[in-house]
Amino acid sequence: MSKQPKYRQVADALRREIDNGDYPPGSRLPSESELSARFSASRNTVRAGLNLLVTEGLVSSSQGLGYEVRKHEVFELNASRFENLSFPQSGDSYSTDVTNAGRRPRQTFRVEMTPAPGYVAERLNVEPGSTSVLRFCHRFVDDVPWSTQATHYPEWLVAKGPRLTEPGDIEEGTTRYLASLGVEQVGYFDEIATRMPTPDEARLLEIGAGVPVLLWTRVGYSGEQAIRCTVTTFRGDLNRMNYEIGDLSARSENEPQ
């Protein structure tokens, strides 16, 4: 006899069935009363098992509709190529990458002059609280919230690139725009972290219980100094990142891209 609490036995059994494809993404699980009969358990016990799967991000619940297996249409981002000007693209890197993957991009913008947060000021090597240009994007893939991206530019850069303060999209992308003005990004430094979302992040990205966010911070450098700090916040259940480093000639074409 299993020493696991009954609610964990319920969760373990349903998790195995989800993993095996018995309940594919988007399908509904049996009702609490049906599961109670199946597992010879009270509805409170069954509900505790289902809530465990909710906190793990495997299922979602909605009042009156029961429990549904989450859909995971993962978008894969090649972080090595993202913003690399040697790769041909017709617009900004996000729109190009999403379109090339056969998906549909959409994004909204907010631009403002704002004091640089401490972590941004440190990375841009400016005084904390000094003015920066914030370009904030709310991005979607196939109308599903995909990420938010907050890019801070130091105030001194505005004199060279006044379009940074324009409220809409810069069609060719900000990296290409700055390069055309002689402010070329020649390198970047990336930081990757995970945590649970803030309430604002959960609202903007429509994140359910148990789903973390992936934070990707990229600081771009010209030959002399840092020129921008970008923090992209991804839904952890819908995104995967990869990098290409070194000679990959031995890598099979059939391996995941």
Image (cartoon, grey):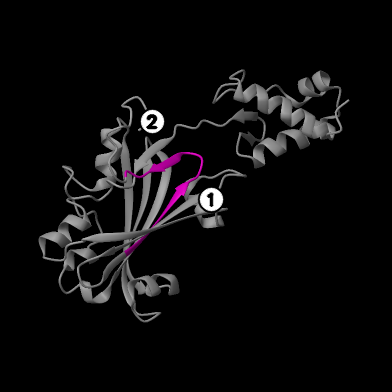
Real-space Cα separation, disc 2 to disc 1, in angstroms:
29 Å
Give coordinates of residue 152: x percent, y percent: 33, 66
User: Which residue position holds label 1?
Assistant: 202
- In this rendering, is residue 242 above or below 4? below
* Figure disc tally: 2
Does the rendering let one see residue 161? yes
Give coordinates of residue 142: x percent, y percent: 37, 35
Quadrant position of the N terminus in the picture: top right
Residue drawn at the location 42% of the way across and 72% of the way down: 117
Give coordinates of residue 87: x percent, y percent: 18, 44
The amino acid marked with disc number 1 is: Ala
The stretch of residues the image draws in magenta is 229-244
Furthest toward the right, the residue is 1
Magenta includes 237?
yes
Residue closer to the observer: 155 or 144? 155
Residue 256: mark: 2
